[in-house]
Image (cartoon, rainbow, N blue to C red):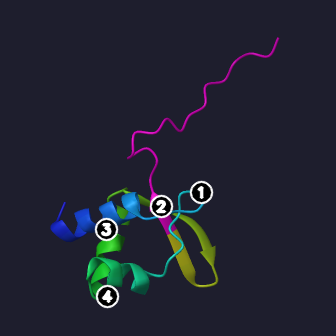
């Protein structure tokens, strides 16, 4: 993972999120927070998505919102089933 990719992952890990875990900020705003040019941020975020670290949570118009993949964060995302009695 490159330094820019680690920066994007850390941003998604530490930035405030909504209830689904998504960061509801535009790429331009997030790029400014980490000191990247918006095209560099978008390209880096795409690489992080392709590597499986981020997943799309929702889309409002043409804007996509992402969150860290819970499986990458070590969260148990499978709820065990039990037989009804």
Depth check: give the residue in front, 23 or 65. Answer: 23
Image quadrant in which the N terminus is located: bottom left
The residue shown at (61%, 74%) is 59
Proximity of marks 2 and 1: CB atoms separated by less than 8 Å: yes
Disc 4 secondary structure class: helix
Label 2 and label 3: CA atoms lie apart by 11 Å
Q: Earlier in the sequence, mark 1 or mark 4?
A: 1
Disc 1 secondary structure class: loop
The residue shown at (55%, 81%) is 63
Residue wearing tag 4: 39
Q: Earlier in the sequence, mark 2 or mark 4?
A: 4
**Residue that protrudes farthest toward the right in the picture:** 85
The segment highlighted magenta reads: 66-85
Label 3 and label 1: CA atoms lie apart by 18 Å
Residue wearing tag 3: 8
Within-10-Å neighbours for mark 2: few <14, some 14–19, many 20+: many
Looking at the image, residue 7 lies above or below residue 78: below
**Residue 7: assigned label:** none
The residue shown at (61%, 25%) is 80
Label 4 and label 3: CA atoms lie apart by 13 Å
Residue wearing tag 1: 20
Prevalent SS, magenta region = loop
Looking at the image, residue 50 lies above or below residue 73: below
Disc 3 secondary structure class: helix
Within-10-Å neighbours for mark 4: few <14, some 14–19, many 20+: few
Q: Earlier in the sequence, mark 3 or mark 1?
A: 3
Residue 47 figure quarter: bottom left
**Residue 67: assigned label:** 2
Looking at the image, residue 47 lies above or below residue 37: above
Image quadrant in which the C terminus is located: top right
Q: Earlier in the sequence, mark 2 or mark 1?
A: 1
């Amino acid at each position: 993972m490159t330094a820019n990719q680690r920066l994007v992952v850390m941003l998604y890990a530490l930035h405030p999120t909504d209830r689904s875990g998504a960061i509801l900020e535009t790429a331009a705003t997030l790029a400014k927070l980490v000191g990247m040019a918006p095209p560099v941020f978008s390209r880096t975020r795409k690489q992080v998505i392709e590597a499986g670290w981020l997943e799309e949570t929702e889309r409002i118009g043409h804007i996509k919102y992402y969150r860290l993949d819970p499986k990458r964060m070590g969260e148990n995302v499978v709820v065990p089933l039990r037989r009804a009695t």
